[in-house]
């Protein structure tokens, strides 16, 4: 079956997931896009290929898209789909993931976009060549840390009576809470520095309001040739910190979202 | 220590928050022919994270009426003040312009009406 052309047709647009060098763009034949009635294909212009698929405008057209973006289950499925498609290209030598939502009227418009941004894409592809993103999170049981710090604050009261002991303990707990915050931040920073040394680039990701035990959320850009040694560094770091109550998790490889920047020129 | 080897096959087992923070907040930004208000996406990321946590928690408690409900539009009528308040605090912390709840007719992302709307551990 020949690949479906994603040309401008009434009722359909072209969704763009990412960009990579045209000669390395190899699409798995059974890979479907966000609209699962349409397969993923590439739309090329000179040396660049956009990873695309057809999407229905009654879902992705401007008005409907706004409404749909507010529906969490719709958004979750489409966001997962965007990532799923890009993951099929993780073996390519270089890959530039786009942010969600780049939709064009047809192939011509996609090619025009590639032409307009050719230099920036080429530069970004060069920076990403042979590199993939890895995500590391570290967790510390904050409550346990607070208790440890409070306990090590020393015994209070004693000869001066139970009332004094009570207030002294309360003060230790307040101090411990503050110190736990500082200690957790220091632990996170120290781990991040250790891992960053083993990577080509690194960046922090946002803290999570729903996960107070998460002390480090970071991404690392790692050369393919260095991946096993990076993973060993992470495993070793995790092993060293585990007795102290820190849990380290790594996921990957990811397309290098965190390193392609908000504009194509940013590293 | 879990990590995904190649070839990746994450499906629903991969943490949604990890995907959201990349697909909606990172990557190269290209303006297509269909206009998406990008700031809305950032706000939606926050709302969605909260809602995902809330929905999971609600489901744990056996509350899933919205799955049987004909449409989510009925949620637009109700305002979950606590969720809005959390959202405003987060937006302020993130340095984002707070969305005007009345003027923004698109703000339909609401927590289920039952009490399970505090996200995760607090």
Image (cartoon, grey):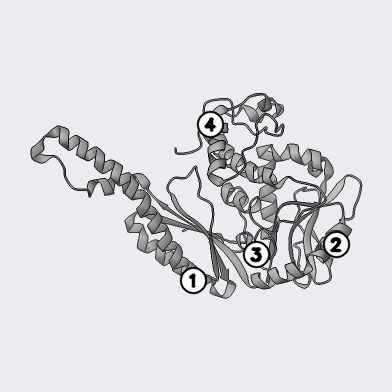
The chain containing the residue under callout 4 comes to: B
Mark seen at residue A266: 3
Q: Where is residue B50 in the image (x, y as percent from the top left)?
A: 56, 39
Residue located beneath label 1 in the image: A198
Callouts 2 and 1 close, C-beta under 8 Å: no
Same chain check for tags 2 and 1: yes
The numbered disc on residue A112 is 2
Closer to the observer: label 4 or label 2? 2
Choose mark 3 or mark 1, whichever is in front.
3
On screen, A180 above or below A18?
A: above
Left or right of residue B65: residue A11: right
Q: Which label's residue is closer to the chain start, 3 or 2?
A: 2
Tag 1 or tag 2, which sits nearer the N-term?
2
Local SS, label 2: helix
Q: Tell me the CA gap for discs 3 and 2.
A: 22 Å
- Quadrant position of residue A29: bottom right
Tell me whether the residue at label 1 lies in contact with that at label 4, contact meaning CB atoms closer than 8 angstroms: no
How crowded pointer 3 is (Cα within 10 Å; few <14, some 14-19, many 20+) is rated as few
The quadrant in which residue A147 appears is: top left
- Which residue reaches farthest bottom? A225
| Relative height, residue A39 to residue B113 (above, below) | below
* Residue A261 occupies quadrant: bottom right
Q: Which of A125 and B112 is in front in this view?
A: A125
Where does the C terminus of chain B fall, quadrant-wise? Answer: top left
Q: Where is mark 4, residue-wise?
A: B117
């Amino acid at each position: 079956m020949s690949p479906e052309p994603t040309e401008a047709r009434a009722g359909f647009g072209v969704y763009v997931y990412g960009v990579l060098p045209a000669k390395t763009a190899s699409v798995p034949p059974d890979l479907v896009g966000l609209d699962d009635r349409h397969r993923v294909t590439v739309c090329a212009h000179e040396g660049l290929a956009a990873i695309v698929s057809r999407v229905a405008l009654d879902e992705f057209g401007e008005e409907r898209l706004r409404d749909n973006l507010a529906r969490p289950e719709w958004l979750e499925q489409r966001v997962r789909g965007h990532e799923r498609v890009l993951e099929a290209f993780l073996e390519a030598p270089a890959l530039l993931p786009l942010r969600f939502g780049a939709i064009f009227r047809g192939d011509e418009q996609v090619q025009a976009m590639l032409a307009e941004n050719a230099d920036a894409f080429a530069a970004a592809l060069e920076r990403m060549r042979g590199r993939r993103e890895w995500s590391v999170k570290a967790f510390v049981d904050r409550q346990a840390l607070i208790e440890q710090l409070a306990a090590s604050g020393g015994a209070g009261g004693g000869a001066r009576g139970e009332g004094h002991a009570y207030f002294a303990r309360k003060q230790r707990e307040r101090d411990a809470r503050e110190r736990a915050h500082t200690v957790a931040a220091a632990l996170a920073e120290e781990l991040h520095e250790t891992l960053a040394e083993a990577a080509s680039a690194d960046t922090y990701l946002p803290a999570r309001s729903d996960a107070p035990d998460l002390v480090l959320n970071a991404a690392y850009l790692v050369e393919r040739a260095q991946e096993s040694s990076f993973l060993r560094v992470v495993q070793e770091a995790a092993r060293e910190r585990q007795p102290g109550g820190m849990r380290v998790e790594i996921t990957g490889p990811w397309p290098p979202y965190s390193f392609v920047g908000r504009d194509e020129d940013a590293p | 220590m879990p990590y995904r080897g190649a070839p990746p096959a994450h499906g629903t087992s991969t943490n949604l928050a990890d995907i959201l923070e990349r697909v909606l907040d990172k990557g190269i930004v290209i303006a297509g022919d269909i206009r998406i208000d990008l700031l809305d996406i950032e706000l939606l990321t926050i709302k969605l994270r909260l809602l995902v946590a809330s929905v999971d928690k609600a489901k744990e408690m056996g509350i899933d009426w919205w799955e049987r409900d004909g449409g989510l539009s009925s949620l637009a009528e109700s305002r979950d003040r606590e969720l809005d308040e959390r959202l405003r605090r987060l937006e302020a912390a993130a340095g984002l312009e707070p969305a005007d709840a009345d003027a923004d007719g698109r703000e339909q992302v609401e927590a289920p009406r039952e009490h399970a709307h505090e996200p995760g551990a607090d």
